[in-house]
Amino acid sequence: MIVGILGCGAIANTIVNEFLSDDGIDIKYFYDTDIERAENLAQISNGIAVLEMDEMLDNVDLVLESASPIALKVHALNIIENGKDLMVMSVGALMDKEFRQKIHKAAQANNAKVYAPSGAIVGLDGIKAASIGKIKKASLTTRKSPKSLGREVEEEEILFEGKASEAVERFPVNINVAASLSIACNMDIDVKIIVDPKVDRNVHEVLVQGDFGEFRSSSENVPFAANPKTSMLAAFSAIKLLKSFSECFSVGT
Ligand SMILES: NC(=O)C1=CN([C@@H]2O[C@H](COP(=O)(O)OP(=O)(O)OC[C@H]3O[C@@H](n4cnc5c(N)ncnc54)[C@H](OP(=O)(O)O)[C@@H]3O)[C@@H](O)[C@H]2O)C=CC1
Ligand SMILES: O=C([O-])CC(=O)C(=O)O
């Protein structure tokens, strides 16, 4: 499978390094508004940095978006309408229902697949199973350091309390996980974002209640040094999903 990358930052660097010696996945094309970042990844993987997304679309099977919600909105339909599969990290953009429907229709019409890896969150497997029954309530409490959230505070502070749809608008590169949970639950879930000077991890606590019963999940994710907003687990989830395409045995929903 030939893969092109849209957005060559923390997540992309980890993914590229993982696949340097993997014969099944060839991460070959790189695009970033900062061409030096694309060139850097192209150099270490013997790939090609492009100046426009259109320069890679004829040659790839799948584009992995690891850029920003705005980048996804700009490029997703063009990628899919070219019949290419798309893996999305900036899931927050998909909280826009009209945009999500357009993507869905385009994917159906062009025989393309759109994947959103579980990212920095733990529990999506259970939620997907639970969604076969009725999910009655779902919430996410995210706690990050001042460095991760770009704030300077002496004590913990609630930065946001409300619905996921508003959270992704106000914190577009910090709370994509709220969108993944909302889409999996098929509801606009409750979100709380706390900046906490006592933590150095990205902490996500999920509560789900439904016909199946109730579960809580909690993860204390190591952030990337290069981008403390982002948890290493998010890159690992994309790597695992890419690897799963060539596996003949699958466990978990
Ligand atoms: N689903 C999940 O659980 C998670 C999702 N994410 C999301 O994944 C995405 C990537 O994360 P991460 O690797 O940490 O981010 P980084 O900021 O480290 O890297 C993103 C790169 O993409 C570039 N970029 C941004 N917009 C565009 C664009 N329109 N066209 C081309 N390049 C662009 C950035 O350039 P510049 O710096 O100049 O903007 C940067 O080089 C983010 O949207 C992030 O919020 C992150 C963590 C978890
Ligand atoms: O990486 C994380 O912990 C979560 C994150 O930034 C996001 O969901 O956008």
Image: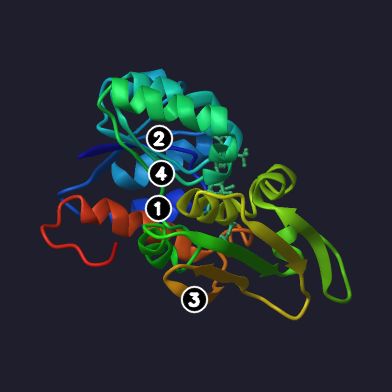
Q: Decide which of 210, 237 is in the foreground and name it.
A: 210
Query: Looking at the image, is mark 3 or mark 4 earlier in the sequence?
Result: 4
Rounded to the nearest whole Å, what is the CA distance between mark 2 and mark 1? Answer: 20 Å
Ligand number 1: quarter of image: top right
Q: Nearer the viewer, residue 144 or 213?
A: 213
Indicate yes or no: mark 1 CB to ligand 1 under 8 Å: yes
Disc 4 crowd rating (10 Å Cα; few below 14, some 14-19, many 20+) is many
The residue pinned by badge 1 equals: 117
Q: Residue at x 53, y 69 (%)?
A: 209
Residue 199, how many percent across, how many down?
70, 78
Mark 3 residue crowding within 10 angstroms, few (<14) / some (14–19) / many (20+) = some
Which residue is rendered at x = 38% and y = 24% of the image? 105
Q: Amino acid at mark 4?
A: Leu
Mark closer to the observer (2, 3)? 3
Q: Is residue 59 left or right of residue 233?
A: left
Q: Is residue 20 visible?
A: no
- Give the vertical position of 85 relative to 136 (above or below): above
Disc 1 marks a residue whose amino acid type is: Pro
Per the image, the residue denoted by label 4 is 41
- Sequence-first disc among 2 and 4: 2
Q: Secondary structure at mark 2?
A: strand
Q: Residues within 10 Å of mark 2 (few under 14, many from 20)?
A: many
The alpha-carbon separation of the residues under discs 2 and 3 comes to 40 Å
